[in-house]
Amino acid sequence: MERLADRVAVVTGAGSGIGLATARRLHAEGALVVCVDVDEDSGKAVAGEVAGEFVACDVTDEAAVRALFDGVAARHGRVDIAFNNAGISPPDDDSILVTGLEAWERVIRVNTTSVYLCCKYAIPHMQRQGKGSIINTASFVALMGAATSQIAYTASKGGVLAMSRELGVQFAREGIRVNALCPGPVATPMLMELFAKDPKRAARRLVHVPMGRFAQPEEIAAAVAFLASDDASFVTASQFVVDGGITGA
Ligand code: NAI
């Protein structure tokens, strides 16, 4: 299946977890994948595996993000797909009562401001093409009170969701689709590190997943490939939920 033949895709956070699985999936569907990560070793390894390109970039750095998208357009002629996915989860209790302003601002910057920057610098290229698909990684926690005790993380994902909806509406008539992806808990290093610190937390979370398990990153990547492709030609401004039933319960 080569749904994405001749498409140029930018994947941020490609070095691990959901980004890694998505880089592999988009490549398998025919796209040229530009793998972006702040971690050079893992990013380079993925780029090599998918015969793509690695760009070292901290997605909170405006000049670097601008250079990323302008560089991709200059080298490859297009930016068809932007999967704005890099993010962090604070490893410790992030209740509002203990979260300091610095920690709050760091999470908002990496998870939300980065999406603003990536959209800002991807969209002009897509406008020129009259076509493009942007997928921003939010989370199920943007849709419900999930009792995660992670106030900055939850707020950061709410921002991604609202921004994606707004941009989807604003650019719909220019052929640019923007969707927020809302995964449930996914078995990636991010989540596993959190649970390793507090094993009871994993059990508590599982209780709320009707399917009784965490997602595999490949199950999220399949949704990204759909949203990136013309199969999703009438899907924009959506909150695309892949959560094993959590938000439906
Ligand atoms: P992960 O920790 O396995 O991978 C994240 C990648 O992003 C890493 O390779 C890391 O180096 C990169 N990264 C972090 N900060 C960066 C920066 N400033 N610039 C460039 N790259 C940076 O995490 P995972 O689980 O794959 O998460 C990916 C996205 O999915 C995140 O936005 C996360 O919030 C979201 N998400 C994850 C869920 C889960 O249960 N794992 C559930 C819902 C959403």
Image (cartoon, grey):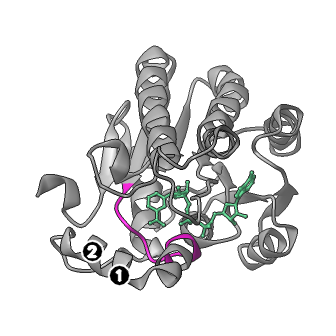
In the displayed orientation, state which residue is furthest to the front: 97
Placement of 214 over or under 233, stated as above or below: below
The mark found on residue 204 in the picture is: 2
Depth check, front residue: 151 or 42: 151
Mark 1 residue type: Lys
Which residue corresponds to mark 1? 200
Q: Residue at x 71, y 69 (%)?
A: 15
In the displayed orientation, state which residue is furthest to the left: 249
Residues at circles 1 and 2 in contact by the CB criterion of under 8 Å: yes
Placement of 61 over or under 138, stated as above or below: above
Q: Is residue 184 magenta?
A: yes
Q: Which residues are magenta?
A: 183-192
Residue 87: name its quadrant: bottom right
Please state the horizontal and vertical placement of residue 135, each as a whole percent of the image: 51, 44
Q: Residue at x 71, y 73 (%)?
A: 50
Mark 2 residue type: Arg
Please state the horizontal and vertical placement of residue 119, each as a whole percent of the image: 63, 31
- Name the element at disc 1: helix
Please state the horizontal and vertical placement of residue 125, each as a whole percent of the image: 71, 27
Placement of 11 over or under 21, stated as above or below: above
In the picture, measured across the screen, residue 75 lies left or right of residue 197, that is right
Q: Residues within 10 Å of mark 2 (few under 14, many from 20)?
A: few
Please state the horizontal and vertical placement of residue 189, each as a whole percent of the image: 58, 76
Q: Is residue 128 visible?
A: yes
Question: What is the quadrant of the C terminus in the image?
Answer: bottom left
Residue 243: name its quadrant: bottom left
